[in-house]
Image: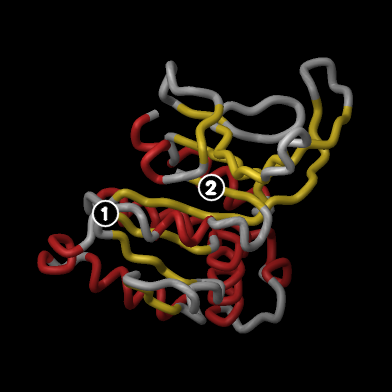
Amino acid sequence: MLFYGLPKIGKTTLLTKFPKSLILEFETGTNALNNAYVQPISKWTEAKAVLRELRKEPVKEKFYTVCVDTADVAWSLCEKYICQQNEVQNIGDIPYGKGYAMCKQEFEEYFREIAMLGYGIIFTSHSTEKSMKDEKGNDYISLAPALPQRPYDIINKMVDIIGYIRSIKNYDTGEQKTFLFLRGDDRFVAGSRFKFIEPRVEFSYEALRDA
């Protein structure tokens, strides 16, 4: 699954509700959480060390789900790792566009192996406005995950759900309520491989599980 929304809307808190979840903290934001297994990661070599641990049977018994918080920063650290391996400052400095291909391969193989080991994977991302095209080629603006296109394409192929988290105000009561949107439209990106899933549920683990 991939969940995205504004900062501090509750993405990371949701991750703690999944049974036996391990949060890979690529971006700081777990200080206020209780009863959560968190592994801080500040560079891609640390992520690779975590993967070695995830291959071990005692770890596979301890955790069901690996949570990537956030995928935006995970991609950035992966890109920096490829630059360091090739002794360049920017990924584009690797000749013939090979740097982008190397980064894509490293990122994709990393998370594919986690999935093949039997873990569920949940990615988080921030939201941003992106320019889209409709079926007639007309441009429009839509809310979407803030990921660059390359990691988004990788994750989009892996996940069964892309959920957009949004807080909505009831102007009659003044109450603010947060929802998880599981079907998208021109305003935002969302979608699911589950054909009959509800288009919108209350933002909670229990509501998502029941849907």
Return the residue at label 2: 3
Percent across and percent down for residue 81 are 54, 76
The residue depicted at 40 percent of the width and 73 percent of the height is 47
Residue nearest the observer in this picture, 26 or 51: 26
The residue depicted at 11 percent of the width and 68 percent of the height is 58
Percent across and percent down for residue 151 are 58, 52
Residue 166 vs 172, above or below: the answer is: below
Mark positioned earlier in the residue sequence (2 or 1): 2
Q: Is residue 66 left or right of residue 72?
A: left
Numbered circles on residues, count? 2
Residue nearest the observer in this picture, 157 or 176: 176
Residue nearest the observer in this picture, 113 or 54: 54
Disc 2 is placed on an element classified as: strand
Q: Give the residue type that dot 1 points to.
A: Pro
Disc 1 is placed on an element classified as: loop
Q: Quadrant of the N terminus?
A: top left
- Give the label, 2 or 1, closer to the camera: 1
Report the Cα–Cα distance between label 2 and label 1. Answer: 17 Å
Residue 193 vs 40, above or below: the answer is: above
Return the residue at label 1: 19
Percent across and percent down for residue 100 are 62, 59
Q: Give the residue type that dot 2 points to.
A: Phe
